[in-house]
Image (spheres, grey):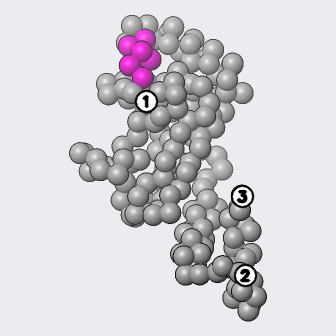
Amino acid sequence: MLTLASKLKREEGVRAGRTPAGSNDASHRVSVRDRLLIKEVSELEANLPNEGYYLGGKFQFEIEVPEAYNMVPPRVKCLTRIWHPNIAETGEICLSLLREHSIDGTGWAPTRTLKDVVWGLNSLFTDLLNFDDPLNIDAAEHHLRDKEDFRNKVQDFIKNYAR
């Protein structure tokens, strides 16, 4: 599996006159995409806000960036088990900016970046926590029924899966 760094080194070799076998224009397009991704990742803030029900948890996400990025959104999945109204127990995420087409106009646009995705994910743990339009209906109903027990279950999930 090639990493972004090895792709960039290979491209620098091409520019220096060392053309690898099988080099073509398609690898150049991927290289431009990779450079964009490296730039975006380097701009991410190290200290995201840390508040709310999920305080103290460390949640791992898989972000798959398709070849057509940034014309289409990345695919994101939560790899950490979590009790959350907008994240299914299987890891699917309900976040409007990850939708290619959104009724409310807040879906993906080519002007969005991975930084927007990270900020959107962070917001799911603070101000965008949505109990009214849940993906995990059981978690949302649990919150409506008993907020303190919901908080306790979230903390149990953090203790068992998110440390």
- Residue 144 quadrant: top left
Dot 3 or dot 2: first in sequence order is 3
Quarter the C terminus occupies: top right
Q: Which residue is most to the bottom?
A: 17
Secondary element at image label 3? loop
| Residue count near mark 1 (Cα–Cα under 10 Å), binned few <14, some 14–19, many ≥20 | many
- Residue bearing the label numbered 2: 20
- Where is residue 151? Give x, y as percent: 53, 15
Q: Nearer the viewer, mark 1 or mark 2?
A: 2
Which residues are drawn in magenta? 136-143
Query: Residue 88 location, x and y as percent?
Result: 47, 27
In percent of the image, x 26 and y 50: which residue is there?
A: 105
Q: Which one is closest to the eye, mark 3 or mark 1?
A: 3
Above or below, comparing residue 76 to residue 57 in the picture: below
Q: CA distance from mark 3 to mark 2?
A: 17 Å
Q: Which numbered circle lies on residue 1? A: 3
Q: Amino acid at mark 2?
A: Pro
**SS assignment for the magenta stretch, majority:** helix
Near mark 3 (Cα within 10 A), the count class, few <14, some 14-19 or many ≥20, is: few
Q: Secondary structure at mark 2?
A: loop
